[in-house]
Image (cartoon, rainbow, N blue to C red):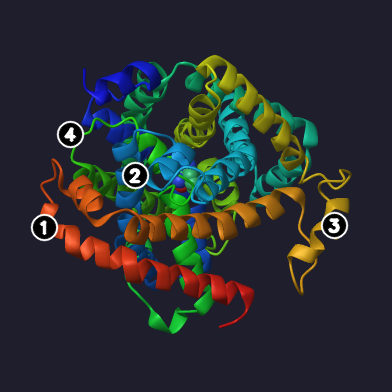
Amino acid sequence: MSDTDGAAENRGQWSSRWGFILAAAGGAVGLGNIWKFPYITGENGGGYFVLIYLLFILLIGLPIMVAEVLVGRSTQKSPVGAFKSLSSPGSLWAVPGWLGVLTGFIILSYYSVVAGWALHYTWFSMTQGFAGMNADEIGNAFSTLFADGDANIRWHLIFMVLTIGVILGGIQKGVERAARILMPILLVMLLVLLGLAITSDGFGQALEFVFKPDFSKVTAAGVLEALGHSFFTLSLGMGAMITYGSYLKKKEDLVAASGMITILDTVIALVACLVLFPITFTFGLEPQAGPGLVFINLPIAFSQLAGGVFWSTLFFALLVLAALTSAISLLEVVVSTFIDEFKMSRLKATLLCGGTITLFGLPSALSGSPESYFGSGFKEHSAFLFEGETGKNWFDTFDHLASNWFLPIGGLLIALFVAWRVGDKAREEAFTTGSRFARWYGLWLQLLRYVVPVGVIAVILYKIGLI
Ligand code: TRP
């Protein structure tokens, strides 16, 4: 029996390459694509931001994606074990693995709260709908939800239970099946909404906004935000792709699979823009609406649209599905590490990790509430983290730490590890085995060795204020 089969017995394995691609793409496509990307594109003035983001995806994101999947597939282990087995026992390289587990733990705890808003909006769309509400009322509805601790906790708990349920099912029965069903539904829903957007008056203006670069709008902060988001959206920097790669059979073409995941993720982010901005322009709303772009602008449009109840239910259900497949990928990293490192059963690891993350998310659910310590008092205690600013609430503090610090540092360490620490022969063999893209090996290695570290370190120096 080959060791691949052995791994399949103990840890689970994808049933096919497409099972892997759909699950990994499902993990990558999430709130980052549909909620965050459109609003940061809006805030940064459109075209040039999209262009720079695409460059980062290609030059930094894709090489790291290949590196993560490669580490996972060749070790068939979750991040901690993978780093250990490619270096030496007791080596410090286990630290980036644990950093990834911590990052997944933190991100899921607040991601679930935003997913909870999407659940609330789906429920609200179905039971009441936005018809008859004016723009102010819709804006207030969002602020009210944001400040309502009880509602946030309720939706957070429901969403975590859903996520935990899928992970309990294991790899093929849980994660892969969820992705096989949810990803195609998501694609179809998005295309239906795109059809609606294409026929709206604002479509031409939206196309120009998203694709015509206006270089007078370039800002340093925008360039750096594009870099950070390219990590977040592709789920890089914390070992999610190492974990998913570890369930991949050794003969599969990992370069082709990584390319496919990157393309799916990017196309869906662009389509999300082409759904949101035509509607925004058609109704004369602002593209710079910030985080409320999805939760305020869209409902305003829906309130005036024929069939608004149907469209808003469809859209927010889609957001929930996208968030669910991503949340699954976050929890799977943590759970698989506990299974591998502490020899726990999947059941025990899932309940323990899922339960702890749920508890850790409660302060995030309370962060919008002015009466809660986590919304107000905590700001004083987190101020030391934000030089020259006042502090942030619990939710924003942990979001800031995880996405702005831990992911880029994690991604940098993974790139350095694969580019400089893993042996030349093993690396080349892992890249080229079964791959139709073997001739890209040299280019990939150069990107990973030089372009990725320089790019990421530049961001970190900028954040520290050194450049
Ligand atoms: N990529 C997902 C999104 O765009 C979020 C996500 C899932 C993620 N798994 C991750 C982000 C791992 C960073 C690391 O919404």
Pick the quarter of the image with the C terminus. bottom right
Camera-side residue: 258 or 279?
Answer: 258
Q: Secondary structure at mark 3?
A: helix
Q: Which marked residue is nearer to the observer: mark 1 or mark 2?
A: 2
Evaluate if marks 3 and 1 touch, with contact meaning CB atoms under 8 Å apart.
Answer: no
Image side of residue 416 versus residue 112, left or right: left
Q: Which residue is mark 4?
A: 251
Q: Which residue is mark 1?
A: 439
What amino acid is labelled 3 in the image? His
What amino acid is labelled 4 in the image? Lys
Pick whichever of labels 1 and 4 is earlier in the sequence.
4
Pick whichever of labels 1 and 2 is earlier in the sequence.
2
**Gap in angstroms between the C-alphas marked 1 and 2:** 19 Å
Pick whichever of labels 3 and 2 is earlier in the sequence.
2
Q: How many marks?
A: 4
Camera-side residue: 94 or 373?
Answer: 94
310 to 297, vertically: above or below: above
Evaluate if marks 3 and 2 touch, with contact meaning CB atoms under 8 Å apart.
Answer: no
**Residue 379, image x, y percentages:** 82, 57
Q: Which residue is mark 3?
A: 381
Tell me which residue sits at (51%, 71%) in the image. Answer: 459
Evaluate if marks 2 and 4 touch, with contact meaning CB atoms under 8 Å apart.
Answer: no
Q: Secondary structure at mark 4?
A: loop
Q: Is mark 3 within 8 Å of ligand 1?
A: no
